Amino acid sequence: MALFAGQPGAHNSNQPHPTMASTPSQDIKKIAIIGPECTGKSELSEYLAQHFGTVWVSEYARAYLDNLNAPYSESDLLKIAHGQVRLEEEWMPEANRVLICDTNLLVIKVWSNFKYGRCSGEILQLINSRAYDLYLLTYIDIPWQEDPLREHPDKREELWGIYKKELAQQGTPFVEIKGERAARRATAIKAIEGLLTEG
């Protein structure tokens, strides 16, 4: 179940590294954008990175699956999880105040549970070892667009409910992102600016 729809690699490869001084890693606020397939996560990630003058970590899964040349299996999800973690670590030193993450390991947990009815203990351990400061949960009010790596166009509402339940069960604040593009962007910016103001 490919719950990813963003640019391959760690960052938009056509965009140069930022020229501003990066923020010490311990002071970076990590923002994870998650939600069902085709809900505008990647577009929002790129926009927010540009708005805040920082970098964004795109999904490892798409690049991985594009190069797989075969149907994926449950074991591939662990490889994808490790790849996603590596990308976050690689781009953290380049971040300016915030690091925008287009997906994180919680998405892989939902993916695994939905498709296989279970999730690797190693993936769960990785999730527990990583902290984020804010989640943005994208809603399904964006029209479905066909993509060979996307699955279950008729399950997006069910999956959105699963994501919301997962977020409600953990302690990190989250904000629902809904509406037209301008409204989504404004909601996300307000949430991140509030986080930065809190310090």
Image (spheres, rainbow, N blue to C red):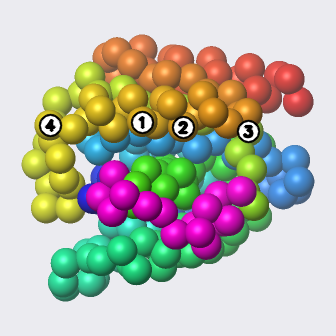
Does the residue at mark 1 contact the one at mark 2 (Cβ under 8 Å)? yes
Secondary element type, mark 1 = helix
Which of the numbered marks, if any, corresponds to residue 133?
3
Q: Residue at point 34% right, 52% down?
A: 114
Sequence-first disc among 3 and 4: 3
Which of discs 2 and 3 lies nearer the camera? The answer is 2
The kind of residue tagged 1 is Ile
Disc number placed over residue 162 in the picture, else none: 1
Q: Amino acid at mark 4?
A: Asp
Label 3 sits on a secondary structure element that is loop
Q: Are marks 1 and 4 in contact (CB under 8 Å)?
A: no
Kind of element beneath mark 2: helix
What distance separates the C-alpha of mark 2 from that of mark 3? Answer: 15 Å
In this rendered view, identify the residue nearer to me: 151 or 86. Answer: 151
**Amino acid residing under circle 3:** Asp
Q: Give the vertical position of 24 relative to 63 (above or below).
A: above
From the image, tell me which residue sits under label 2.
Answer: 166
**Quadrant in which residue 71 is drawn:** bottom left
Image disc number at residue 154:
4
